[in-house]
Amino acid sequence: MNRRVIHWFKFASPQKFYFLAGRMWPWFAALAAVLTAVGLWISFFVAPTDAQQGEGYRIIFVHVPASQMAMFIYLVMAGWAGFGLAFNTRLSGMMASALAPTGALFAFLSLMTGALWGKPMWGAWWVWDARLTSTLILLFLYLGFLALQSSIDDPRRADKACAVLALVGVVNVPIIYFSVNWWNTLHQGASVSLTRAPAMAAPMLWGMLIMVAAFWMYAIAMALVRVRNIILERERHTEWVQHAVE
């Protein structure tokens, strides 16, 4: 058991993780492409028309996975940042920085697709709904993380400052998730639950689940690609990086 722990612990080194990420990211990228193609085909050509919302409901196959990933990536980003703050590990801060742009992308995509969905359903592009407002705050937290990271020249100091910001912002994630239960909002409750049967047709459910998996694969692939670039940038003066670049 100890040997296994030691074997995986070696990848905490930026040098070791750089080469591991290089082997892994193409597989995740390929899975993302395949799953996205299958998920979109099911979502737009197989799933039936909704009885109440018509064809306009199909935006949920992008909106819901994007919203879920925006929240989950923030938790993972904050976890990496907090781990780095507690144990002063270099790779942790790099991983947090690598995840932030993808999380911001999903938060932005959630808001944009939500507006496209909200206009025909609610009659307005934007309302100060509890979930919309807290998701907008999530986007600002991502952007604030990225701005703070780029404003501090010393990467180690930047990682610590960003870790504090990320950990403070974690409180916003449960607010987003439970907003439909805590306040009277325009958003409907969850259609999929572990405790009851799904409130949607099987093709709709499969399309949703496959799109969620596709977004997961994309997020992992992009994080691995981005962390490799961050490692090269921060370790550029080391001998191993010079050999890797050559």
Image (tube, rainbow, N blue to C red):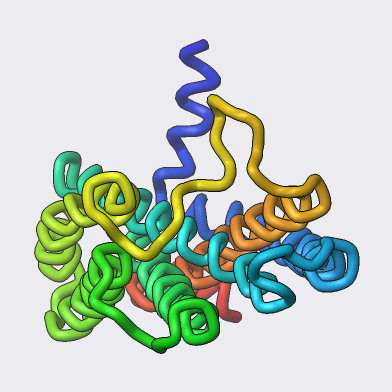
**Vertical arrangement, residue 217 with respect to residue 13, above or below:** below
Identify the image quadrant of the C terminus: bottom right
Kindly give the residue lying farthest to the right in the view shown. Answer: 46
Residue 217: x and y in percent read 65, 58
Q: Examine the rendered structure and indicate whether residue 189 appears above or below residue 134.
A: above
- Callout count: 0
Q: Can residue 232 be seen in this view?
A: no
* Coordinates of residue 94 in the picture (x, y in percent): 34, 62
Q: In which quarter of the image is residue 31?
A: bottom right
Residue depicted at x 47% and y 14%:
2
In the foreground, 222 or 211: 211
Q: Is residue 111 left or right of residue 117?
A: left
Q: In which quarter of the image is residue 181?
A: top left
Percent of width and height locating residue 159: 19, 64
Q: Residue at x 33, y 72 (%)?
A: 234
Residue 110 relative to residue 138: left or right: right
Coordinates of residue 113 in the picture (x, y in percent): 52, 79
160 with respect to 177 (left or right): left
Q: Which is nearer the eye, 93 or 147? A: 147
Which residue is rendered at x = 31% and y = 63% of the image? Answer: 131
Q: Is residue 183 left or right of residue 115?
A: left
Q: Residue furthest top?
A: 1
Looking at this view, is 208 or 89 the one in front?
Answer: 208
The answer to which quarter of the image holds residue 216 is bottom right
Asked if residue 85 is positioned above or below residue 215 in the image, the reply reads: above
Residue drawn 50% across the image and 52% down it? 17
Residue 60 in view in this figure: yes
